[in-house]
Amino acid sequence: MLLIVYMSRFASALTKGELEELGSAAAEKNLHLGVTGVLLYDNRRFMQAIEGPVSSVHGLMDTIARDTRHRELSYVCRDSLEQRQFDGWSMRSAHIDPSLKLAELRLQVADLLVGTTALPVKAAFFGFAATSRRMRPSAQTLSRW
């Protein structure tokens, strides 16, 4: 099984409804592909973790790379897995509100990643949330994660 975490920027502004539809469509498609994961977004960027059979994840990443809603796609993490990190949902998604305090963002991300044991995945999503506020998490904050 393969896990990929990537980040990209919105190619253009997306409405709340468009983002919710994107999450719903991803959940439906992933269910058919045997892929699970999580999608986090702020007002300008996506971060997504997808996991599943190697061929399904590669095919999905090819589709995402061609999706005109994304630009500046970059891989954050790629790893082989023996067990799923996001078992139980085909795609969970959430919006990060940049106006929240860092502690509130940490709780939101922790709730989103319940059951996830991969530290690089946790660090990537926590860092994504923290930078949505244009802040850098301190080493002390990351150690509490």
Image (cartoon, rainbow, N blue to C red):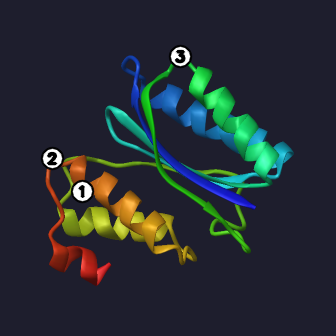
Q: Of marks 3 and 1, which one's residue comes earlier in the chain?
A: 3
22 or 62, which lies in front?
62
Secondary structure state at the residue bearing disc 3: loop
Q: Which residue is mark 1?
A: 130
- On screen, residue 87 above or below 71: below
For the point 65% across and 51% down, the residue is 91
Q: Is residue 37 left or right of residue 113?
A: right
Query: What's the amino acid at mark 2?
Result: Arg
Residue 99 % position (x, y): 19, 48
CB within 8 Å, label 3 to label 2: no
Q: Which residue is at a point 72% across and 66% down the rendered structure image?
A: 88
Where does the N terminus fall, quadrant-wise?
bottom right
User: Residue farthest to the bottom?
Assistant: 144
CA distance separating discs 3 and 1: 26 Å
- Residue for badge 2: 134
The crowd level at tag 3 (other Cα within 10 Å; few <14, some 14-19, many 20+) is few
Say what secondary structure mark 1 lies in.
Answer: helix
Reading the image, the residue beneath label 3 is: 68
Give SS at disc 2: loop
Distance between the alpha carbons at the discs numbered 1 and 2:
7 Å
Q: Residues within 10 Å of mark 1 (few under 14, many from 20)?
A: many
59 displayed left or right of 71: right
Query: Does residue 22 sit above or below 30 in this rendering?
Result: above
Query: Residue at the location (30% across, 58% down)?
Result: 127
Q: Quadrant of residue 11?
A: top left
